[in-house]
């Protein structure tokens, strides 16, 4: 029970740290190191013209080496710090776990697009949204800018909050970094493009496996958050049941469909990547076009879900402390 209690405390504290300070530029970030290793590995071992089975094999080696190196380094750092001082070990654990969470970064990114739309117009908003999506943004309409932002906020609730918190609960900083390494691999070499179709196959599948349970846990958080923010809960579940499975990811369609249904808008549709059209299955019903306030509404749903998760962790921690004290008595 002692280890479980510590992990719950670390997860709650990591959420609080991220919400308060996010990722200050002056503090070294583990994801940056992970990203540099992935780039180094790709440069030295990936061959574009290789046979598909060879690319898959090298891609598997990339996934394995990245996650093992990230986990091993994290375990060593936490262990050494804990040997020096148990409080230092706890602090390092919390800080590392907070770097795997992006609650503040996600909400700030969404609100930055909204702010640019209101204060500086569509061109500035296109520039802002280009920082958080991979699609072409130069010719997006206002409704498309809003759609792209809402999709990002909704989809990343799982990747940026729920998954790292759940892995923290299981194994502290070591497993939280394992998840973040897998997620970084997917974002950098996932097989959505022709270049990474085979090389990124293992990374993408590993990320899908790790996110499977967290994405389904997120349905409970989203249900509560949508109810708290006066969204359409019935519409959210209708969209979830009908549309989530249409998404190319087995996990991302869940939060995206629920947020679309809650807002009463349609997400997905036609996007362009490097000038090439790509049609993604639609989520939700187009009862009305996307408008500026939908960004703020999606951020409020994100905030409500994160506060509920934090509250659940604190409650669980207090209950366990109470049970432990009662047992001693």
Image (spheres, helix red, strand yellow):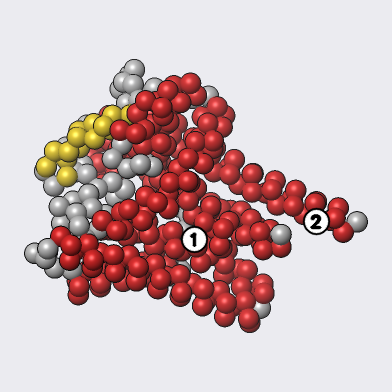
At x 42% / y 59%, what residue is drawn?
180
Residue 60, by quadrant, is: bottom left
The percent coordinates of residue 222 (x first, y second) are: 50, 35
At x 32% / y 26%, what residue is drawn?
266
Instruction: Work out whether 79 lies above or below 52.
Output: below
Q: Separation of disc 2 and disc 1 at Cα?
A: 27 Å
> Helix, strand, or loop for circle 1?
helix
Horizontal arrangement in the rendering, residue 265 relative to residue 18 (left or right): left
The percent coordinates of residue 299 (x first, y second) are: 45, 38
Horizontal arrangement in the rendering, residue 310 relative to residue 280 (left or right): right
Q: Earlier in the sequence, mark 2 or mark 1?
A: 1
Residue topped by disc 2: 324
Residue topped by disc 1: 176
Horizontal arrangement in the rendering, residue 232 relative to residue 58 (left or right): right
Residue 228, by quadrant, is: top right
* Residue 42 in view of the camera: yes
């Amino acid at each position: 029970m002692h280890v479980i209690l510590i992990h719950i405390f670390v997860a709650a504290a990591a959420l609080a740290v991220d919400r308060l300070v996010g990722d200050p530029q002056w503090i070294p970030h583990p994801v940056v190191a992970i990203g540099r290793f992935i780039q180094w590995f790709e440069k030295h071992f990936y061959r574009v013209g290789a046979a598909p089975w060879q690319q898959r094999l090298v891609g598997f080696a990339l996934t394995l080496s990245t996650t093992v190196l990230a986990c091993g380094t994290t375990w060593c750092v936490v262990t050494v710090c804990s040997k020096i001082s148990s409080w230092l070990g706890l602090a390092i654990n919390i800080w590392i776990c907070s770097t795997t969470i992006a609650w503040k970064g996600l909400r700030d990114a969404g609100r930055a697009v909204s702010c640019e739309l209101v204060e500086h117009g569509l061109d500035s908003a296109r520039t802002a949204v280009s920082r958080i999506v991979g699609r072409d943004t130069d010719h997006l309409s206002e409704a498309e800018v809003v759609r792209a932002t809402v999709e990002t906020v909704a989809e990343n609730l799982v990747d940026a909050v729920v998954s790292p918190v759940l892995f923290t609960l299981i194994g502290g900083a070591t497993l939280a970094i394992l998840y973040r390494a897998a997620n970084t691999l997917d974002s950098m070499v996932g097989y959505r493009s022709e270049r990474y179709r085979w090389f990124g196959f293992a990374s993408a599948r590993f990320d899908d496996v790790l996110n499977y349970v967290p994405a389904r846990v997120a349905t409970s958080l989203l249900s509560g958050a949508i109810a708290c923010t006066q969204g359409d809960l019935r519409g959210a579940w209708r969209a979830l049941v009908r549309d989530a499975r249409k998404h190319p990811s087995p996990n991302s369609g869940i939060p995206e469909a629920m947020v679309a249904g809650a807002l009463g808008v349609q997400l997905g549709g036609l996007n362009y990547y490097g000038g090439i059209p790509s049609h993604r299955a639609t989520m939700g019903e187009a009862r009305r076009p996307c408008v500026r306030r939908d960004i703020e509404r999606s951020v409020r749903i994100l905030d409500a879900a994160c506060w509920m998760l934090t509250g659940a962790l604190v409650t669980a921690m207090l209950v366990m402390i109470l049970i432990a004290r009662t047992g001693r008595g």
